Image (cartoon, coloured by chain):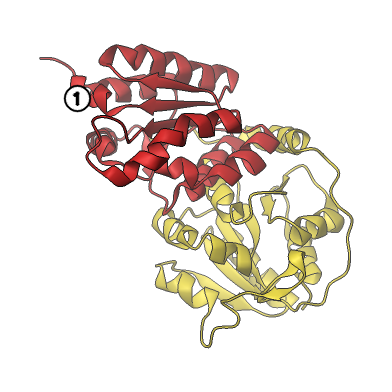
Chain colours: A yellow, B red
Amino acid sequence: MKRFEAIKTVAGAVKDEIVVSNIGDPSKELFAAGDRKENFYMLGSMGMASSIGLGMALANKRDVIVLDGDGAVTMNLGTLVTIAKEAPDNLKLVILDNGAYGSTGYQRTALSSTTGASIGAIASACGNERVKTVSDAASLEAELKSAITSGKGVIIVAKVDTAHEKFPFIRDKGAAIKERFMASVSNTTRGLYGKKS
Amino acid sequence: MTISAEDRIIEIIKKSGVDLAVTVPCKFFSGLLEKMEKDGSVKVVWPAREEEGLGIASGYYLGGKKGIMVIQNSGLGNMVNALLSLNRYYEIPVFIMVSHRGGPLEKVEAQNPMGEITPALLDTAGIKYAVMEKPGDLAVLEEALGRFVRNNESAVMLIKQSFWSNA
């Protein structure tokens, strides 16, 4: 499937969930698929989307869906260890795996050029219990909905191809994106750690 | 019985309402981190690298809560891009307790180059910092942490080795 098809599938399946999108094309495509207040478009800091999502999942009761990339996760590979250790039930990490640095011209990632390497296998080896690999939109939607309804954390590796269209840049400023986002999720913030909320 | 600097820091953090500490350790924080985990009112998260930790602390803020970071100054070098393209760009505040290595008491020579440029690095990045070099400087920590919690003001606390040797 195309990456945009995967992103549209996620955008079509959400209700009040938080969605965090990786720098570059995934953020542009999420915006095009349906801008909403609960989307946090990460327009810089490549590699940080899954970590931001982990922090949100620890602070907020909502489900947090992260749309990350295989290149970005490889850049921040330690995130798979930390997510395995913290394992919040409400974190759903979707790794859009096209084997390439899409936003910079589709150069192949080292991982995709390495015989036998698999981001899903790495995630499992780190101790993440629920790791799924999908290659079509129906399976992606089914795995995501299953993780949401069963209240389980999940890492979904969504195999996408490098075919893509051009989408416009997001013109909103960082502070405006942040403020709109925070206002929309402030009613589900968790209570103090160590105390019953 | 005198109260240790570590216990006083934990009390300051608890009183502030912060309930998350994201850490990549320094040996000067070993006592603090151990006591913090034992105390249990501040969640301690251990990322693999400081930039990753900054992402977690930033996400915690975006999700509606406040956490701090507890790292060595070498880790500031590992997170410079995110400090600017994430925290500066989105105006996401951070509070970072930094063990500032290097200087006259330093036993590990390799700590000196990064230690020497740390204040200039923060100046260049436009991040406010305060120095803690003696036990009385806990008041500086308390004040800066209060401004972080109430007014979303970022700060880095550069904690010198002399702080611990005098504590």
Is residue A156 in view from this perspective? yes
Left or right of residue A104, residue B54 in this image: left
- Could you say where residue A120 lies in the image, as x and y percent from the top left? 52, 75
Q: Would you identify the image quadrant in which residue A135 lies?
A: bottom right
Q: Would you identify the image quadrant in which residue B133 lies?
A: top left
User: In the image, is residue B161 above or below residue B107?
Assistant: above
Q: A180 or A110, which is in the foreground?
A: A110
- Identify which residue is drawn at 59% across, 52% down: A48
Left or right of residue A94, residue A104 in this image: right
Is residue B72 in view from this perspective? no
At label 1, which amino acid type do we have? Ser
- Could you say where residue B90 lies in the image, as x and y percent from the top left? 69, 36
- Identify which residue is drawn at 59% across, 32% down: B124
- Identify which residue is drawn at 50% across, 50% down: B52
- The residue to which callout 1 is attached is B165
User: In the image, is residue A187 above or below residue A114?
Assistant: above
Left or right of residue A112, residue A162 in this image: right
In the picture, the quarter occupied by the N terminus of chain A is bottom right
Q: Chain of mark 1?
A: B
